[in-house]
Image (cartoon, rainbow, N blue to C red):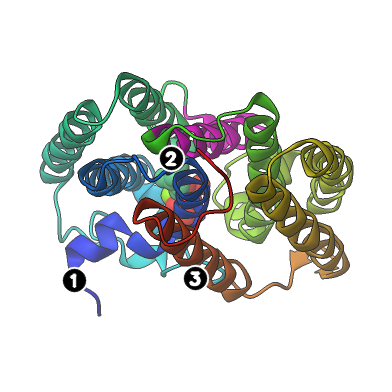
């Protein structure tokens, strides 16, 4: 079995937020960006995720014991707090260290990046922890994940500062909410059993998946405007968004049988990892002046 600290931090689950962060970073970098800032940004990102997942496992310790291993990065019953391999107090200390480290490294980058990391740390906390515990409130779960994905995208953009356009940012928020919805549906059975009223439990899996259609339509409109009005780099980006999102929405809605969504987790994890690597690679090429699509 994986080390108890890896099971506490759940780095594989970070991939869902690594995608908006990396795409933002890739789009934002210019040949004038600072390599050290990029490294610090990844450390701040990892510390934010570590903080958010530790407080989540503290808040979820009783429900995680009921998990059967389905549709997740791991069987949550093996979370080290649920198995008592790590005490709640030790986890709390660790979460504090990660919280302060995320803020410290963010502060080394730029004031906007610092502010955004401060906010997403707060979102990570109110998502899991009482009294808010928004993950257990319909719409609250979607809003937190959409906010976190959109804001971490802006943080990524801000490292280099290019392409910080309102429409691009709006697109990132809409796209995050679209791709969050299937994940709350794959958790539906477990959340219902555990008595957690997520949006999927409240509205039903079918209804909440159907919400992907108007959101996809809105995203396509945004992407088309970007495609028609922006620079070459954003045109390519907008085309990829359209090509990736429309089939995803259709496939996800077609794979709901009864109340179960039959989508293997790798359908999210593998493309998200590949797109993240490609985005960071693209940003690095721009940084070293090896690929210039736009003139900065
Ligand atoms: C786990 O949530 C997800 C997180 C802790 C990341 C959320 C971070 C934000 C900043 C919103 P979960 O308890 O709903 O899922 P799981 O059952 O996989 O733990
Ligand atoms: Mg949890």
Is the distance from the Cβ of mark 1 to the nearest ligand 1 atom less than 8 Å?
A: no
Rendering quarter of residue 285: bottom left
Q: Name the residue under label 2.
A: 156
Depicted 65 relative to depicted 153: above or below: below
What's the distance in space between the residues labelled 2 and 1, CA to CA? 30 Å
Residue 240, horizontal then vertical, whole percent: 72, 59
Residue at left 49%, top 33%? 154
Name the chief secondary structure element in magenta: helix
Q: Depth-wise, is mark 2 or mark 1 nearer the camera?
A: 2
Q: Does the magenta stretch include residue 154?
A: yes
Specify which label sits upstream in the sequence, 1 or 3. Answer: 1
Depicted 68 relative to depicted 295: above or below: below
The one nearer the camera, 97 or 105, is: 105
> In the visual, does 13 lie left or right of 214?
left
Element under disc 2: helix
Residue 68, numbered label? 3
Residue 87, horizontal then vertical, whole percent: 14, 49
| Label 1–label 3 contact, CB within 8 A | no
> In the visual, does 139 lie left or right of 15?
right
Element under disc 1: loop
Residue 188, horizontal then vertical, whole percent: 66, 55
Q: Mark 1 points at which residue?
A: 3
Q: Depth-wise, is mark 2 or mark 3 nearer the camera?
A: 2
Q: Give the range drawn in magenta.
A: 133-158
Q: Is residue 74 magenta?
A: no
Residue at left 42%, top 63%? 281
> In the visual, does 70 lie left or right of 138?
left
Q: Is residue 257 visible?
A: no
Specify which label sits upstream in the sequence, 2 or 1. Answer: 1
């Amino acid at each position: 079995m994986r080390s108890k600290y890896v099971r506490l931090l759940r780095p594989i689950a970070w991939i869902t937020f690594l995608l908006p962060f990396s795409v933002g970073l890739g789009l934002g970098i210019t040949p004038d960006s600072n390599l050290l800032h990029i490294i610090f940004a990844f450390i701040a990102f990892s510390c934010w995720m570590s903080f958010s997942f530790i407080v989540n496992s503290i808040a979820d310790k009783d429900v995680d014991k009921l998990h059967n291993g389905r549709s997740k990065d791991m069987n949550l019953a093996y979370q080290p707090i649920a198995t008592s391999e790590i005490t709640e107090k030790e986890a709390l200390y660790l979460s504090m260290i990660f919280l302060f480290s995320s803020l410290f490294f963010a502060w080394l980058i730029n004031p906007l990046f610092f502010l955004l990391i401060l906010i997403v740390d707060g979102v990570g906390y109110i998502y899991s922890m009482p009294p808010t515990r928004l993950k257990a409130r319909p719409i609250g779960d979607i809003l937190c994940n959409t906010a976190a994905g959109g804001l971490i995208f802006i943080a990524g953009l801000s490292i280099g500062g290019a392409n910080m356009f309102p429409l691009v940012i709006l697109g990132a928020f809409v796209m995050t909410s679209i791709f969050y919805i299937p994940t709350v549906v794959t958790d539906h059975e477990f959340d219902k059993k555990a008595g957690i009223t997520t949006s999927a439990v409240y509205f039903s899996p079918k209804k909440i998946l159907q919400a992907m259609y108007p959101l996809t339509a809105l995203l396509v409109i945004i992407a088309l405007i970007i495609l028609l009005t922006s620079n070459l780099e954003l045109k390519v980006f907008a085309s990829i968004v359209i090509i990736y999102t429309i089939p995803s929405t259709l496939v996800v809605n077609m794979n709901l049988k009864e109340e179960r969504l039959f989508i293997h987790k790798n359908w999210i994890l593998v493309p998200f990892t590949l797109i993240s690597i490609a985005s960071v690679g693209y940003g690095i090429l721009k940084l070293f002046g090896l690929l210039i699509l736009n003139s900065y």
